[in-house]
Amino acid sequence: MESITKNRQSPGTLRAMIERAYGAEQVPAGDSWAGELGHGWFNVAYRIRLRDGADVVLKIAPPPHVEVMTYERGAMSIELKTLDLIRTHTSVPVPDVHFADQSHDLCDADYFFMPYIDADNLGIVSAGLPAAEREAYTEQLGAANREINSIRGPGFGPLAGPHDPSWRRVFTGIVEDVLADGERRGVDIGWEYDVVRAVVAEHAGSLDEVTEPRLVEWDLWDSNVMVRDGKIACIVDHERAFYGDPLIEAGFTGTQISAFGDATPFMRGYDHTELTETQRVRRRLYCLHLMLIMVIETVYRGHTDSKQYDWARPRLDEAMALLGRTRR
């Protein structure tokens, strides 16, 4: 997938990165030792074959001159911290980090190396799977997501802080950052920005029910799940994690917006019963937040076609309707 945030590097720079991470004896010779992994919108990732034949993945953060959304700043540091938390506190399979560099002297951004995961991307293969197999994977994902959410945080907000005891304050601040991003770039979201702010404020009381901060992935879609032989082999892309309400996780989105698919298998694996009325209100706020991002990020990514925008805009209207606002 194409995005202006992808920070591609020359073969010479890639070789220098490999030497720093693995030593001069592992720098590949000849051609065809690096290929870009195209699935994903934000970071650039390369599959690299080292001189000894081992396959690894190099992930590079966006270049500093490209403006990203507020919540995406420092995303690679977030991912490295999240990987450490999950690896240390759960049994959920995540990649090891072979080497990470934040010096910016070989290239202008953070980067890290991890092993290549020899497995299928669930987001790519899911449509071709039998329904029972697809549901089994989704159940496994629900169970894995619950285990990730078992990690308690010191407060709500970014992993590195600042932390806040109020989820209402943190989440409404998160939404305000997204709205400010949209206003700064003049993104047409189909609504007056202050109307969206008012809707969030009207329903913000539902957020007070959440009192225990938990590690949430937020971006744990099928496309970040690698599967092999009927099991989840690895979960990748952890750069949007924070301490918040587990109900904000992607797997619950379909409980309110059917376009995201049936959430039943995920909830079964998560061992979550039917949502209460207050939980439904919170989940609708989280849907609104998600759809705002999906609309606004198309400008920040520099999308050359309107496919995502055209899909997300009606879903944003749907999220607003679920919160009591419809067009006259």
Image (tube, grey):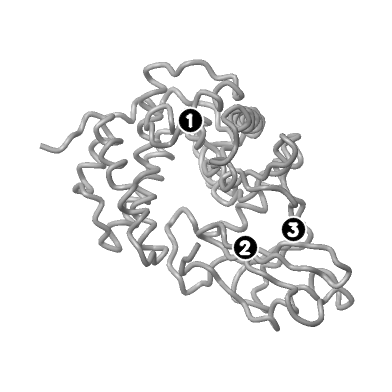
Q: Residues within 10 Å of mark 2 (few under 14, many from 20)?
A: some
**Residue 17 falls in which quadrant of the image?**
bottom right
CA distance separating discs 3 and 1 = 29 Å
As drawn, 163 above or below 20: above
CA distance separating discs 1 and 2 = 28 Å
In terms of sequence position, does the residue under pointer 3 or pointer 2 come before the other? Answer: 2
As drawn, 113 above or below 148: below
In terms of sequence position, does the residue under pointer 1 or pointer 2 come before the other? Answer: 2
Where residue 102 sits: x, y (%)? 67, 67
Helix, strand or loop under label 2:
loop
Residue at horizontal 43%, vertical 40%?
170
| Front residue of this view, candidates 31 and 170 | 31
| Front residue of this view, candidates 310 and 88 | 310
Q: Nearer the viewer, mark 1 or mark 2?
A: 2
Q: As shown in the figure, which amino acid type bears the numbered disc 2?
A: Leu
Disc 2: which residue: 37
Position of residue 315 in the picture relative to residue 134 (left or right): left
Q: As shown in the figure, which amino acid type bears the numbered disc 3?
A: Met
Helix, strand or loop under label 3:
strand
Q: Any mark on residue 252, and which?
A: 1
Disc 3: which residue: 114
Residue at horizontal 66%, vertical 32%?
144
**Residue 68 falls in which quadrant of the image?**
bottom left
Residue at horizontal 25%, vertical 61%?
186
